[in-house]
Image (cartoon, rainbow, N blue to C red):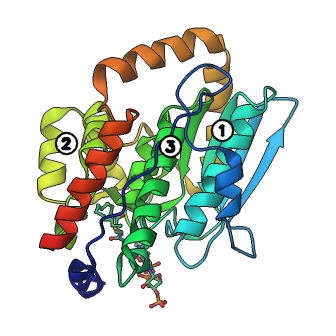
Amino acid sequence: MANVLRNSAKFGFSGVLSQLSIHSRHGRECVSPCFSLQQRNNSTSPKIKVDLDSSTGVAVLRMQSPPVNSLSLDFLTEFCINLEKLEMDRSCRGLIITSTLSKVFSAGLDIMEMYGKSPERCGEFWKAVQEMWLKLYGSNMATIAAINGSSPAGGCLMSIGCDYRIMVDNPRYSIGLNETQLGIVAPFWFKDTLVNTVGNRAAELSLELGLLYSAPDALKIGLVDQLVPEDQVLSTAQDTMSKWLAIPDHARQIDQCVYIIYNTSPLPLDHARQMDQCVISVCIYYI
Ligand SMILES: CCCCCCCC/C=C\CC(=O)SCCNC(=O)CCNC(=O)[C@H](O)C(C)(C)COP(=O)(O)OP(=O)(O)OC[C@H]1O[C@@H](n2cnc3c(N)ncnc32)[C@H](O)[C@@H]1OP(=O)(O)O
């Protein structure tokens, strides 16, 4: 796998992100419209399953893309379409993300998307990664990751993009931003999200050494909020969600907004997204 990553160096990409600029129903910045997402979703079997309980207002999004829920362009597109639909549905106030696979939450970005692809495809892929994070981190819903397996790299990003993380108490499951171990560098907005979660020093050590934490170690540094037995991860997430939803939405959303404005990178701005594209291109060139 590391070889695939190293070989991908020669396929640097130069596509420029198109402008992403529609606004959500709540006025917060949103990304490209459902229409364009649907146009590029060519997959046949669904990689995502969503169940919305209209009596509680809680949706459970299950990632079901074997073998490891890797974040391919198709996967990310489907993920974003589902998030967008839930975001537009006023009856949905809370979202729980989990995996149907045993042992794996998500293996992160699909390695094959970074190998031997055209610059245009790489650009489209990176844009989808950005969209996934923007939609999740900026969501108006309360979001909980029910992490029932390993969650390296992009899988960890998805987890820390949620408001709260509950992980299965199994030392064999790991989580972390391990990019440097693969010879690549986590983009600045991965870093910011991690700093917001575990603080500066822990994030610095974690990123530079590309550390993957076992579930108990992840709890120690605050990378996850709670550990539970495997068979309780979803019920605990549901119980926790009811506490989050006891807070009036507008108060939680405004609080989150203030937090994001003061603590997060400018990725939601168009120029920052384009700058990110350039940085990633250079990184790939030097791998
Ligand atoms: C466009 C340019 C972008 C530039 C990016 C720069 C910034 C980088 C940002 C983010 C980086 C990433 O997210 S990179 C992905 C990093 N991911 C990992 O390091 C995880 C690697 N995988 C694992 O550790 C393990 O697979 C696992 C713990 C997740 C599961 O272990 P398990 O033993 O259950 O399964 P296997 O290891 O046997 O794997 C099964 C099967 O899945 C394939 N696989 C695994 N991970 C990936 C992946 N990320 N992408 C694609 N495919 C993956 C693995 O090769 C096996 O396939 P085969 O059965 O065919 O051999």
Say which residue appears at 36% left-offset and 62% top-offset: 15
Residue 224 placement, left or right of 60: left
Q: Work out whether mark 2 precedes mark 1 in sequence or the reverse, and give the earlier one.
A: 1
What's the residue at 30%, 69% (across, down)?
Answer: 13
What residue is pinned by disc 3? 166
Amino acid carrying mark 3 in the image: Ile
Query: Which structural element holds mark 3?
Result: strand
Q: Which residue is mark 1?
A: 95
1 or 3: tag closer to the N-terminus: 1
- Cβ–Cβ under 8 Å for marks 2 and 1: no
Cα gap from disc 2 to disc 1, whole angstroms:
26 Å
Q: 110 above or below 130?
A: below
The structure residue drawn at horizontal position 24% and vertical position 63%, both measured from the top left corner, is: 281
Check disc 2 and report the residue beneath it.
203
Report how far apart the C-alphas of labels 1 and 3 lie in the structure: 13 Å
Distance between the alpha carbons at the discs numbered 3 and 2 = 19 Å
Q: Amino acid at mark 1?
A: Leu
* Foreground label between 3 and 2: 2
Residue 187: percent from the left, percent from the top? Answer: 25, 51
Percent coordinates x, y for residue 270 in the rendering: 38, 37
Label 1 crowd bin: few (<14), some (14–19), many (20+), radius 10 Å: many
Amino acid at circle 2: Ala
Count the marks: how many?
A: 3
Dividing the picture into quadrants, the one containing residue 69 is bottom right
Q: Where does residue 110 sit, x and y in percent of width and height?
A: 44, 72
Q: Secondary structure at mark 1?
A: strand
Of the 4 image quadrants, the one containing the C terminus is: bottom left
Q: Is residue 141 left or right of residue 190?
A: right
Q: Circle 2 sits in a helix, a strand or a loop, which is it?
A: helix
Taking depth in this image into account, of 239 and 79 the one nearest to the observer is 79
